[in-house]
Structures are given as structure tokens and as C-alpha cells.
Image (cartoon, helix red, strand yellow):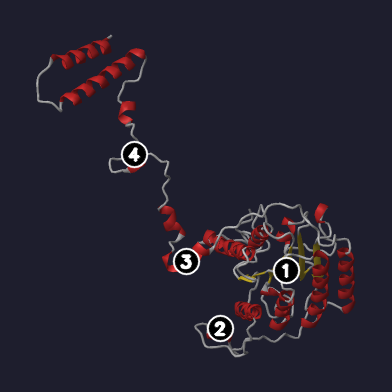
Amino acid sequence: FNVGEDCPVFDGLYEFCQISSGGSTAGAMKLNLNQADICINWAGGLHHAKKNEASGFCYTNDIVLAILELLKRYQRVLYIDIDIHHGDGVEEAFYCTNRVMTASFHKYGEYFPGTGDLKDIGANAGKYYSVNFPLRDGINDESYESIFKPVIQHVMDWFNPSAVVLQCGADSLAGDRLGCFNLSLKGHASCVEFVKSFGRPLLLLGGGGYTIRNVARCWTYETAIAVGVELGDDLPYNDYFEYFGPDFRLHIAPNNMDNQNTPEYLRKCIENIIENLRHVEHAPGVQMQALVETGDLSDAEEDTPDDRLPQREADRKIACEEELSDSDDETGDRRNEQSHRELFDAPAGGTGETAAGEGAAESDGTASDDAQEPAVEEPAPAQEATEGEEAMQE
């Protein structure tokens, strides 16, 4: 499953996948129940994982699980990816359906994962429902905004999604250790603000990002955008204050790298994408069916993290109710009323041995009943035992 190369095994891997996938799925359930307008899971956004393999530091694709949850209630879901890498796992999962449209803005050309060409538009019923905008090195805020807003505007007009999932990978920021874009926090967050302006149920997810201090800056600022709070540029003192030196400010300055995305190249890509969107059925409908009831999360919220047991401790307390036991200290229905001694004390063999065993069992039962009365010597039990011995000799 490609685990061990770019997806190393580490202690707590299963719990990490639970947190990531569970957070995104729970956010989708919140949107389904109309308990929130915007849900955020910065631990999610693992867009490279596929059904049959882990890939690109992604073990389980929480985005696909969340979209499947949203499709239980909403007819059409739009997925937008502003990570520097192409969201290949999500695109592959919904490549042949017209209920999910994927739109990815990513670096293309000798760059992981190597997919996301402008010509990748979907297949079968999902043809023209995959939108890919391949970009080159050094794109800045102005160029990014000039392509993002018109493309997403046309997608919203033609596809008319009922809900939106936005993956906010921070490796497209300037100064990322593995990235090659030149976006500032404001340029990156302008995508969140634009998508939020449509007023659709919105699920915000994390993603890539390899300069940790800038990842924290980015998602803090975008959380403020989501909740409508304005943040100052000066960082408050905290336990990790020294990581944000030497300026100790929220926003980062773009560098002086060249923008290889020429206006002509960007214009041609926009024209190509808009032309493909003209083939999309306007607001495609789905067959009417009863809505799938989504579980209520109110009971789960009452639990506090301090009261929860670790997964390993909880597993140790699990015991199958159907499991039988011959232990004398078992109570209730778990004790097996049929003793193993009755099954294995009788000698193995043919019909004669079985009859002898039954005779011995009857003898034991008679002796037990007589033990409750005053001790009186009676020849009958001894005679029955003699007859049993004769049967065994025969």
C-alpha cells in the first residue's frame, strides 16, 4: 500500500487517521444537520490518499469521506483545492460522477504527483466535471486572484453546488520548504473569503505546509476570516512565541522570485476551462429519494476529552457478549451451563462405551440425590455401579 516510502509508519498512526477522517466526517454531519454554516478541520485535507494506497503523506482520504457524507443530503458538492499539489486522490474518487465537481489550482510539470493536466476533465457521466488549472513557479497574489475568481464564479454559476469543500493547503505560500509559489497570507486567504461570500454550507480543511510557523499563521488568519474577526499584525505572547521570530508578526512578505505564469498563458487556460464548463449540464439534478438520516452529535459533545479513554485502553475492556466461559466466577448469562467435563469424561469409542458413560452419569446423579438424605446404606447404587462395570468389561 505504498506505506514506508513517502508514507512512513509511526506510533499512533491509527489514532492520527481517526482524528483526521473523523473530524472531516463530523464537520460534514454538522452541515447536514444545519448545526453550522462553516465547519473547520485543519487536521484534514489529506487529498493524495486513494482507495488502494497511501500516498504523499496521506493515509486516509478524509475529504472523500466528508464529501460522501455531504452527498447524503446535498445533491451537488463542489471541491476546491488551493494546495500547491494536485488533489489527485479526490479527483480520482469522483472522476466519473456529475454530483461532485473538483477544481484544483496546482503546480504542474515534474512535480508530485504528476497529474492534473488541463486536459484531465473527467470521464463518463463525470466528463467536464473535473477542472484542473496547471500553474508554473512563482505565481503571486495578483495573478492567483485573476484566475481563481473568474473560474470559481463560472463554476458556481453553471454547477450551482449545494455545499462546498475547500482544501486550504499552506504549501502554496511564499517561503514554503517544498513549495515554489509566492503567495502571501492575504492572497491565500482571499480564496477563502471569496468562497465564503456565496453563502453555501462550507467545510474548510487543512492540507500541505512544510514551514510550520507559516502554516500556523495561515490557518489562524483564515479561521479569523471564516468567523468574521479582524486580527492585528502583532502576535500575542505564547508558549511558541520564539518560533515566529525575528519579526514576531502575523503576515509574511512575498519574496522576489520570478513569476513564470505569463498573462497570456493564464488567459488561455481560463478560456479553455470556461469552454469546457459550457458542456456541463446546468445544475444537474439527481433522482428524488428519501434523505439519509444522519446521527445526532449532541451526545458525543457532552463527553469531555479528559473523560475519554485512549483507544488501546478501550480495546482492552471489550469482551464479546456471545463468548462462553466455564469459570466459576462468571455470573449472568455468560456462564456455559454445559460443563466440559460431561463432554470429555466419557471414554471415546462405540455404542457400548457411550452406554457405559450414560450409566456412570446416572450413577453419579443418584449418589448426589441420596447425599441430601440421612446416610443409609442401600445396595441399589452399588448394584447399578456393578452393572456399569460389567458393561465396560464387555
Q: Which of marks 2 and 1 is in front?
A: 1
Judging by the rendered image, the residue that carries numbered circle 1 is 81
Q: Which of marks 4 and 3 is in front?
A: 3
First along the sequence among labels 3 and 1: 1
Place of residue 165 in the rendered image (x, y in percent of width and height, measured from the top left): 69, 67
Q: Nearer the viewer, mark 1 or mark 4?
A: 4
Judging by the rendered image, the residue that carries numbered circle 4 is 335
Amino acid type at circle 1 is: Asp
Place of residue 206 in the rendered image (x, y in percent of width and height, measured from the top left): 64, 70
Place of residue 150 in the rendered image (x, y in percent of width and height, measured from the top left): 83, 74
Q: Is mark 3 on a helix, strand or loop?
A: helix
> Contact (CB < 8 A) between labels 4 and 3?
no
Q: Is mark 1 on a helix, strand or loop?
A: strand
Residue at 61% across / 59% down in the picture?
A: 59
Judging by the rendered image, the residue that carries numbered circle 3 is 302
Q: Distance between the residues labelled 1 and 4?
A: 57 Å
Q: How far apart are marks 3 and 1 (CA)?
A: 33 Å
Whether residue 135 is visible here, answered yes or no, is: no
Q: Distance between the residues labelled 4 and 3?
A: 35 Å
Quadrant of the snapshot with the C terminus: top left
